[in-house]
Image (spheres, coloured by chain):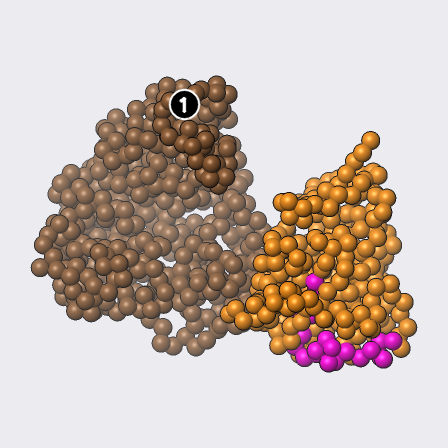
Chain colours: A orange, B brown
Amino acid sequence: MEMWFSDVHTPNIKLNIRVKKQLFSERSDLQQVDVFDSEDLGKFISLDGEIVFSEADEFIYDEMVTHVPMAVHPSVKNVLVIGGGDGGVAKELCRYPEIERIDVVEEDEMFVDVSKRFFPETAEGLSDPRVNLYIQDGLKFIRNKKGEYDLIINDSTDPFGPSEGLFTKEFYGSCYKALNSEGIMVYQHGSPFYSEDEEECRKMHQKVFQCFPVSKVYQAHIPTCSSGYWLFGFASKKYHPLKDFDAERWKKRKLHTSYYTVNLHQGAFMLPEYVEEILLRAEEDR
Amino acid sequence: MLDQTSAPLYEALERFRKMRVVPFDVPGHKRGRGNPELVQLLGEKCVGIDVNSMKPLDDLCHPSSVIREAEALAAEAFGAAHCFFMVGGTTSSVQSMIFSVLKDGDKIIMPRNVHKSAINALVLCGGIPVYVDPEVDKRLGISLGMEPKKLEQAIKDNPDAVAVLVNNPTYYGVCSDMRSIVETAHRHNMMVLADEAHGTHFSFSDSLPVSAMQAGADMSAVSMHKSGGSLTQSSLLLLNGTVNADYVRQIINLTQTTSASYLLMSSLDISRRNLALHGDKAFKKVMEMASYAREEINALGDWYAYGKELVNGTSVYDFDITKLAVYTRDVGLAGIEVYDILRDEYGIQIEFGDISNILAYVSIGDRLQDIERLVGALDDLKRLYKRDKSGMLSLEYIQPKVAVPPRRAFYSEKVSLPLKETEGKICTEFVMCYPPGIPVLAPGELVTKEIIEYVIYAKAKGCNVQGTEDFEVNRLNVLK
């Protein structure tokens, strides 16, 4: 028997993964949740038919949204993770002893339950005593927060699904308000490669660029993402991701990583020309 | 009792599709084959049922089978004696009501904040409007409902009037005391026509204001395509047992197309079924969502999302809590400015913005996460745009001075003058902001200084001002 999962990247391009077994399939109030087991990517979870993460490449994502800001900001105490019900980002954050509080806001309880059941190693990040899990709409949670956080990580999945509200101008504006005067926001910036995604990528940069004094974009290679090439946004009220980057300080922590290095930190901000052009267009288009 | 789970017109279309009839009739695209781009845009299913009237599918102009059955089901669902499917928007329903009761020179009593379609109908049929000035909420700058004692006075002054037209509710959700109005009008042998363009849902919940049919009105124009969920441009005209349905059908056929769209009509049939079966539950959810949004928006400060607290027993007899109107001036912005910013900056399209308010349309298609976006956007918009509110025009209702009946004014000899030079003249055309489409000036009304100032201000703020022969509304046609 052959069973294949198709992750549709554009109407004309898809990534096929041979499935050993489907482990879970249910509809939550918000979306369709499925878990599969595969040969090369291990277990992976999809929401509304799109892969959110796989065991094989999840580390790349979690490390890149965590260590990049942590190597820049000198003293992070309060962190907000929007989305992130799988616990992967929280787990990575928990490796920093100076962090006092990690609020994780996930809108879909089923996503948390399924992560705990099928990805217990990742989800263990949620059981650290510093982590507070809120099952709530991210936009609503952040609306009443003022100057509370040093770092906000937007770990929500998809600008077109149930979490589309977390890719909007009002959301970035609310993040700005919820951060203190030295705060940093890291967010998913999508893939710039296919023309379908390019427009969304440009608009996203435009919204954040208008909102924050520092707004930079960095990259990573994530095999299960659209085109395998993924961007992240680094927005901040004060710190520049390279000028305020303290490699020595981070190295002294002696954290073991599988993707992030201090060299890669700098390289990640060196973007291909076509991406620079997309970003420049967003900045000029007002 | 009819079987509300059936949808005769929709079912007939399904049967028809399976018959695979070879079309040698219109429409000429022949199930889309002659226009592949249209199929690309609308899909095969959609163009496949874009067909002409024929025996198995009945004929809207003279319904005798499936359309007739579908109309009977709709009548029952809305508590009416008779129902007509309408395909020319609720404009056609409103106008058919007026043409059915008014002849040349007959008077009709109505509030001035009617939709333009009502006054347009008077231009066509020669009816004469008697306006009941609505009370105005001074802070919000919105016209309220029709007060029974003012109606009583209007009837006393115009005992020869033949009908009363009422909005149930207004665009903003304000309801008049329908039962008293019906009682008063009927006592004086006047018909009651209700413009229920914004009140389709009233028939399907006990927690909402009374529907016109329930209150005993004679006719009602219902925008199924607004809160009812059918396709844009589809509408219903409801009659009570007091009206001769066959005469109304003749009236409708004076202006109605003979090629009524089956897409529109089947959408009415399906939507009626949905409302009859699930309307109560669906509108309960809409009420909850709108109420939640109101609480959250009011908690942000400076915005005022109003609701039942406006109810005062007279000019606001009841309030439709599914309407989410927000007063914007304490943020220092005109409603129309908020409307534009929400669309341009936040990707949120709302129903309309006027000088002091915005209206976000909440319906059976909404989800809580979208409400969160709207609330979040209003919060962020305030943070970025809040400014001093001095220097904003505060609009109050401008009482119209009707000098000449609409039809005579519209067809009289006229002269075009720059807007600023028209003070004291009699206007021969309409001026309105769209939406909401309530005329600032109607044919036959005196142009005053306040009106000129208002139009100039509305244009400057970005309102879509229209209605005049001069496309830019820099000039106005006035009586010679």
The residue nearer to you, when weighing A29 against B82, is A29
* Magenta region, residue range: A231-251
Which residue is pictured at 25% across the width and 31% down the height?
Answer: B253
Q: In the rendered view, does B173 fall on the left or right side of A177?
A: left
Q: Where is A5 relative to B68, above or below?
A: below
Residue B51, percent from left and from top: 40, 28
- For the C terminus of chain B, the image quarter is bottom left
Q: Which residue is mark 1?
A: B23
The residue nearer to you, when weighing A54 against B142, is A54
Count of numbered labels shown in the rendering: 1
Q: In the rendered view, does B479 fall on the left or right side of B133?
A: left
Specify whether residue A203 is painted magenta: no
Residue A275: image quadrant is: bottom right
Q: Chain for mark 1?
A: B
The residue nearer to you, when weighing A89 against B445, is A89
Residue A212, percent from left and from top: 61, 74
